Amino acid sequence: MKDITLRSRHILAGCLATTALMPISAFAEEDYTLDEITVLQAFESPEVEGYAAGHSSSATKTSTPLVKTPVTVNVVTEDQMLDQGAESVAEALSYTPNVVTNYRGESTIYDETFIRGFTYAPKYLNGSQFGTPGFGQLDPFLLDRVEVVKGPNSVVFGSAIPGGVVNMSLKTPNENTGNRLVFGLGSDNYKQLSADLRGDLNEDGTLKYRLAVTGWDKDLQGDAFGQSRLSLAPSIRWEITPDTELQADVIYQKDPEAGQRNFYTLKGTLEPTVGGHYYDRDLVSIAPEYDQLNRETYSFGTRLRHSFDNGMTFRSSLRYTEIDQFQNNVLVDNIDSVGVPDDIADLGVAWIKDDYKQFTFDNSLESQFSVGQTDHTLLVGLDYQQQKHRSNNRTNWVTPLQFDLSNPSFITPADDPSQYLRPDNIQDVRFKQTGLYVQDQIAFGRFNLLLGGRYDRTKTTTENLSFGGSDTAESGAFSGRIGLSYEFDNGIVPYASFSTSFQPSTDYDVNGNLLDPSDARQFEVGAKWASADDKLFVSAAYFDIEQTNIVEDDPVNGWPHRTNIGTRRSKGFELEARGRVTDRLDVIAGLGLVDAQMTEGQYAGFTAQRIPESNASLWLNYEFIEGLSGAIGARYTGSSFGDYAENIVVPSYTLFDLGLSADLGLLSSNLKGVKANLAVTNLTDKTYVASCVSSWDDYCWFGEGREVRFQLTYDW
């Protein structure tokens, strides 16, 4: 396998070297023509009406029709998020094939996603990394779309898991006009007020602004424990000249009550205790008067584009992000301690203060030209990112605190949980990555060929400021991608692609040694079709991914210690259809099948934990009469394993959702622009276990119960 991987990399490198020289040879022979630069800017995702998008720049960093992109890209539009009442990016992706978003039930404070059998996909904002896979969150109201780029994507994004990445598109000024005001109410005493405002700042329209702001509050457990947020994102767009444009944005998000990061044992969730007891499904906090989790997020970004007369386009983007978070809570540790009755859970105390800073920039030069019968879009770029994460973790999993499931009683501040905290354990992790990439999209006849290659250097430095000691690791990695598609007369575009990725480690084992880096490869074949008006899009794909040096929590010593568990191979199939089927019917349909097996290491031959074998979803939105629509949705999640011995089986479950929308302006001219939207998730209020995991103990999480959201929107 190692020889095959090296051979594949050499082939990709040779192809890229040949491609990179093509424009030079073209100038030498003076047999070339320059194509007109596409009007659609690659750094600006176009606004979409309905459920289907026609273009995306996430997979290639250039504006490319989705139907001609030889990898799978799932696009969730703003209309879908509104119709389905998504309160988080994770919820927005709940109808996406082979994407797991609710594995922790209501404990979704980070928008963690599993894609194609691999855990914790990284998050990006306008193509720049935002936070980490398990840290940081943005409100979906600030976004106009969320995209999932499936498979290894190191050529575009650098280090990443091979399952895929999530790229969020911020609401920024564009050529569209109009403002929106939103007022929302719902179950759990939910209250929301949001606004999306935009317009011109000068007479000729060369300077535009946009402001997205939202605030909401809800109860998680009575009046004692809740969740609240204030988010705002002002941005400007300046057309300096007809060929030069600059965008700048600022994001501020305050979460005074960010939610809860809970753990619950297998006994009491998936299985009853000896006494036949379960945790209350709605039990968010065991110490609601003591627990707290607050977070503050700042981010600033710019994007510059300049088109030269010779047909080249220069793009430059940068983003700086700070995330400060404090978590102080009581968590379930285990059940079945020696000498402790089976109905009683031992409790631990968590105290974690995180200060996270991140800087990224990306400079690229795009050239569109023709050589003979081939049309090229050549992209050459350099990107850089730097992360600094200071964490003070005083967590202590061994305390005398207990929770009796047979006679539940909350832990209170009078119990003084803080007395069991450990001393300060302050650790700094600094990560730097520099990448050089080259990509060529070649069109000849009905064929489209994508070639991409990248080389990265990474440096990870860890220092313990409390107990001393530091460690630095440096590495380099080449990643590549090649894809070929063909367009038939009927619009069907079959394709095949091969790609690789890498992931340097920032985790340490119990002995303080930095874990080995990971690399991966994927073969993918599929087909896509889009209607002529881009209102309906259908895609199907088969994939085969293999990743080495999988990192998970140490099963013996427990978190925060990590360990390499071996190699995983994930194979599967995906089918998605989204968009307008008739003048009255819109549909989102998806099917995902995945077989994620460990092939090397101590768990060889067993299925990966927390990965459902299948998922399927269907959302039908039908306009009964003009201005009145109703939607029904169903989400099926197949069974999964909660341990590598395949002894813990989490049953499959099916959830139903409901949506209603009415244009009140058709009832009265005084209500012009006012629409009412109702979204209900888990309509039947089904109780189910979302997932289980076996680490230093066996933990499970209940899925979210029914949620009702009613919104009035006013557009003008």
Image: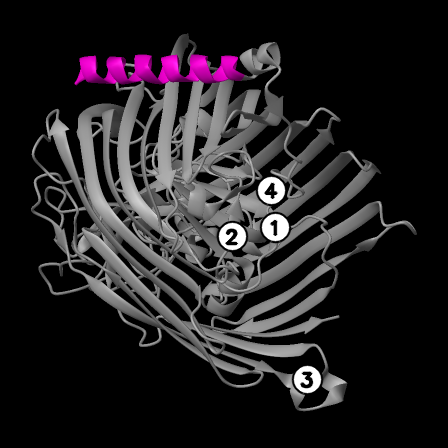
**Quarter of the image that includes the C terminus:** bottom right
The image quarter containing residue 69 is: top left
Please state which of residues 427 and 337 is positioned toward the viewer in this rendering: 427
**Disc 3 from disc 2: Cα separation:** 30 Å
Q: Is residue 288 left or right of residue 510?
A: right
Mark 2 falls on what kind of element?
Answer: loop
Query: Do callouts 2 and 4 mark residues in contact (Cβ within 8 Å)?
Result: no
- Which residue in the rendered view is the most extreme toward the right? 203
Per the rendering, the mark at residue 46 is 1
**Disc 4 from disc 1: Cα separation:** 29 Å
Instruction: Name the chief secondary structure element in magenta.
Output: helix
Please state which of residues 656 and 699 is positioned toward the viewer in this rendering: 656
Mark 4 falls on what kind of element?
Answer: strand
Magenta part of the chain: 1-22
**Quarter of the image that includes the N terminus:** top left
Query: Which percent across, then down, holds residue 637?
Result: 24, 59
Query: Which percent across, then down, holds residue 286?
Result: 35, 55
Regarding residue 63, the answer to whether it shows in the image is yes
**What residue did someone put label 2 on?**
54
At a point 36% along the width and 32% down the height, the residue shown is 483
**What residue did someone put label 3 on?**
665
Magenta highlight on residue 518? no
At a point 44% along the width and 12% down the height, the residue shown is 17
